[in-house]
């Protein structure tokens, strides 16, 4: 790649992810374009793995725009729930059995602003997670975030760049902190002794699943830039 600024489509509609990518990609000669501003129709996330879903999203953005595309798929894996919510993390509450909806909602009655932005979907997902873990002791609430990032140079790229990052922690009994998004208020990092929602962006980006995957991607992009 030359030193000229290049268009790069970020295939996500999640404002929290976009903000993190913008901070992490600062300084590289790429102009980030959000798929919404280019009228990209998002791909249906039908994959069974984070890799499959990230590829589906990146390919859809690249096909519809003609630009290189960056996509990530990430989620929370909870050991006591046999890996759930996993690839369904963003749709966890929507997948809840109808009989459980009223029951788990009462666990979330105080979660209205737990993500710092009042995101209804995040609140509902956190409420279901607390309900599912209501009888699980602290020692068995181990969990980890996963993030897979895919970069396609074009829609038919035969060798897409793929990076994976994971972040170990456990699930709290109640939300703490007002920063971040998603499950951040319930995810506790023992090393930092903070929830993800209590961390500064600088700390979170350094140690998080997405931060790890992005660092691998940055190394790749810098190599391409100097090629």
Image: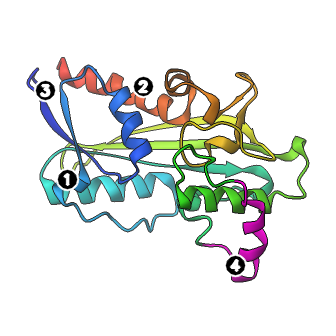
Upstream in sequence: badge 3 or badge 2: 3
Instruction: Kindly identify which residue carries mark 3.
Output: 1
Q: Residue at x 70, y 44 (%)?
A: 186
Give the number of marks: 4
Question: Which mark's residue is nearer the viewer, 4 or 1?
Answer: 1
Q: Is residue 184 left or right of residue 54?
A: right
Instruction: Kindly identify which residue carries mark 2.
Output: 215
Instruction: Name the secondary structure under disc 3.
Output: loop
Instruction: Please state, as top left, top right, bottom left or bottom right, where the N terminus lies in the image.
Output: top left
Magenta segment range?
A: 95-110
Question: Which mark's residue is nearer the viewer, 3 or 2?
Answer: 2
Q: Residue at x 74, y 76 (%)?
A: 102
Q: Is residue 97 magenta?
A: yes
Instruction: Name the secondary structure under disc 2.
Output: helix
Instruction: Name the secondary structure under disc 4.
Output: loop
Residue 97 — which label?
4
Q: Which of the two residues, 107 or 37, is positioned nearer the viewer here?
A: 107
Q: Is residue 198 left or right of residue 14?
A: right
How packed mark 3 is, by other alpha carbons closer than 10 Å (few <14, some 14-19, many 20 or more), is few
Q: Where residue 98 sits: x, y (%)?
A: 69, 82
Label 3 to label 2: alpha-carbon separation? 19 Å
Label 1 to label 3: alpha-carbon separation? 25 Å
How packed mark 1 is, by other alpha carbons closer than 10 Å (few <14, some 14-19, many 20 or more), is few
Q: Where residue 27 sits: x, y (%)?
A: 26, 19
Q: Residue at x 77, y 46 (%)?
A: 174
Image height of 30 relative to 185, above or below: above
């Amino acid at each position: 790649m030359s030193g000229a600024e290049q268009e790069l489509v970020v295939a996500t509609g999640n404002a929290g992810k976009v903000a993190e990518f913008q901070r992490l990609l600062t300084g590289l000669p790429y102009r980030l374009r959000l798929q919404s501003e280019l009228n990209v129709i998002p791909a249906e996330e039908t994959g069974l793995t984070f890799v499959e879903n990230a590829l589906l999203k990146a390919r859809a953005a690249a096909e519809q725009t003609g630009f290189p595309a960056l996509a990530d798929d990430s989620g929370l894996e909870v050991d006591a729930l046999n890996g759930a919510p996993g690839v369904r993390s963003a749709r966890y509450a929507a997948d809840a059995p109808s009989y459980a909806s009223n029951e788990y909602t009462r666990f979330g009655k105080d979660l209205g602003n737990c993500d710092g932005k009042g995101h209804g979907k995040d609140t509902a997902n956190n409420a279901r997670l607390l309900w599912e873990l209501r009888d699980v002791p602290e020692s068995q609430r181990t969990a980890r975030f996963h993030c897979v990032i895919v970069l396609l140079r074009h829609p038919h790229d035969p060798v897409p760049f793929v990076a994976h990052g994971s972040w170990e922690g456990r699930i709290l009994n109640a939300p703490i902190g007002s920063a971040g998004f998603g499950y951040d208020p319930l995810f506790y990092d023992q090393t930092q002794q903070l929830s993800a929602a209590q961390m500064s962006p600088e700390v979170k980006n350094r140690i998080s699943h997405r931060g790890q995957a992005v660092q691998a991607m940055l190394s790749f992009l810098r190599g391409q830039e100097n090629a």
